[in-house]
C-alpha cells in the first residue's frame, strides 16, 4: 500500500461473524446492534426509511460548511474516509482495527485512510483509494457526501476527513430493486445492509466493526477526557475497542455539528437527539 495511515489477508464480514460464533472472545457484529425496542437512554433509532432525508441533510450541511483548513506547514497531507452505512435499519459508522503487523498504533481503531499519493487526482480520490485498498470497498460503492474540517495527526500530517455513504449502485444487473436491501433509492444509490457485503481486508487491518448512531450517542458510552495542556479529548466505548485519538476527535465534532442536526431536521416529529457535553 502506498503511504497508508491504516495500511492493511483476505477476510470477509461473514468470516468474522462465523469465527465469533465459535470463539467467545471474538468480535460478533450482531452484539453491537441494540434491539430497537429497548434502548437504555431512549434514543430514537434512525430508521432506513426514509433514509434520503437524513442523507440529503448531511450532504447539504457539509456543502455549506465553513471548513477549517490547516494553513501551517506539516509533514504532508492525508485523507480518511468516514464510512456511514446502514446495518439492519439504523444509520451507523464503520470502523477498522489496526493489526499487530503494523509499525505503529497497533490495535488502535480508526477509519480507512492514508497519505496522498502523487498519482491521486485529489483528496477525495486519496480517501476512496485507501478505503478500497484496506477494506476492499470499490469507489463506485461509496456516495461521497462532502468534506469535513481538516485536522492535524499526532504524526504531524494534515488530515482531511471525507464523509461517504457506503452501499452499492443500482444497475441493470440488479435482480430486483428491493433485493436484500432495506433502504430507499437515493438518487440512484441504493444501500445494502453492510453485514451482507463481502469485505476484503488488508493484512494490517485485523478487524472491522459497525456502531449504530444510537450507541455512539449514548452518554454512558461517550465522554471527554480532561488531559491538562493537551486539552479535552473525546472517546467512545460502545464497541469492542475504545474509539479515541484523532478518530474520536473527528467523529465527535462530526456528530455534534453535522449528523445530529441533520437527523433532528429530517425527523422533527421525534425528540431531538442529544449532542455531547463538549458541544454545550
Image (spheres, rainbow, N blue to C red):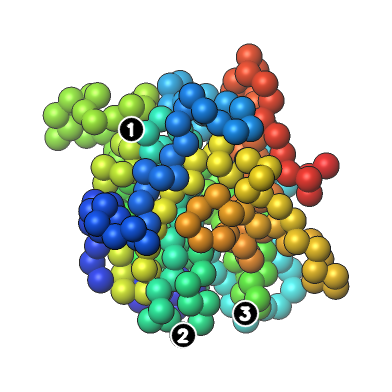
Return the x and y of residue 7 as percentages of the image width and height: 40, 74
Return the x and y of residue 25 as percentages of the image width and height: 37, 61
Residue 20 in view: yes
Calculate the distance from the C-alpha at mark 3 to the C-alpha at mark 2: 13 Å
Circle nearer the N terminus (3, 2): 2
**Residue beneath the point at 55% across and 31% down:** 39
Q: Which residue is mark 2?
A: 103
Q: Is residue 19 above or below residue 4?
A: above
**Residue beneath the point at 80% across and 68% down:** 227
Q: Which residue is mark 1?
A: 190
Q: Residue furthest right?
A: 229
Closer to the camera in the image, 60 or 192:
192
Calculate the distance from the C-alpha at mark 3 to the C-alpha at mark 1: 37 Å
For the C terminus, the image quarter is top right
Disc ID at residue 94: none
In the visual, does 228 lie left or right of 192?
right
Return the x and y of residue 185 as percentages of the image width and height: 35, 26
In the visual, does 21 lie left or right of 8?
left
**Residue beneath the point at 51% across and 69% down:** 108
Q: Which residue is mark 3?
A: 155
Amino acid at each position: 500500500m502506498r503511504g497508508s495511515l491504516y495500511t492493511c489477508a483476505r477476510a470477509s464480514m461473514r468470516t468474522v461473524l462465523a469465527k465469533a460464533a465459535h470463539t467467545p472472545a471474538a468480535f460478533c457484529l450482531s452484539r453491537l446492534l441494540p434491539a430497537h425496542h429497548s434502548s437504555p437512554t431512549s434514543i430514537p433509532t434512525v430508521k432506513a426509511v426514509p433514509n434520503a432525508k437524513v442523507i440529503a441533510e448531511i450532504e447539504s450541511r457539509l456543502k455549506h460548511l465553513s471548513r477549517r483548513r490547516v494553513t501551517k506547514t506539516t509533514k504532508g497531507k492525508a485523507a480518511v474516509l468516514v464510512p456511514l452505512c446502514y446495518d439492519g435499519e439504523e444509520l451507523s459508522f464503520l470502523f477498522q482495527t489496526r493489526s499487530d503487523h503494523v509499525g505503529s498504533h497497533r490495535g488502535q481503531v480508526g477509519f480507512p485512510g492514508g497519505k496522498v499519493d502523487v498519482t491521486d487526482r485529489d483528496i477525495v480520490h486519496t480517501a476512496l483509494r485507501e478505503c478500497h485498498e484496506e477494506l476492499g470497498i470499490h469507489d463506485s460503492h461509496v456516495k461521497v457526501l462532502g468534506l469535513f474540517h481538516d485536522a492535524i495527526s499526532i504524526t504531524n500530517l494534515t488530515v482531511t476527513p471525507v464523509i461517504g455513504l457506503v452501499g452499492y449502485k443500482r444497475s441493470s444487473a440488479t435482480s430486483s430493486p428491493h433485493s436484500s436491501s432495506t433502504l430507499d433509492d437515493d438518487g440512484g444509490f441504493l444501500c445494502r445492509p453492510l453485514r451482507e457485503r463481502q469485505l476484503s481486508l488488508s493484512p494490517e487491518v485485523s478487524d472491522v466493526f459497525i456502531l449504530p448512531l444510537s450507541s455512539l450517542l449514548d452518554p454512558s458510552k461517550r465522554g471527554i477526557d480532561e488531559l491538562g495542556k493537551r486539552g479535552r479529548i473525546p472517546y467512545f466505548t460502545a464497541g469492542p475497542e475504545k474509539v479515541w485519538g484523532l478518530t474520536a476527535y473527528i467523529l465527535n465534532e462530526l456528530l455534534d455539528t453535522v449528523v445530529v442536526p441533520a437527523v433532528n431536521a429530517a425527523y422533527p416529529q421525534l425528540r431531538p437527539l442529544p449532542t455531547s457535553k463538549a458541544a454545550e
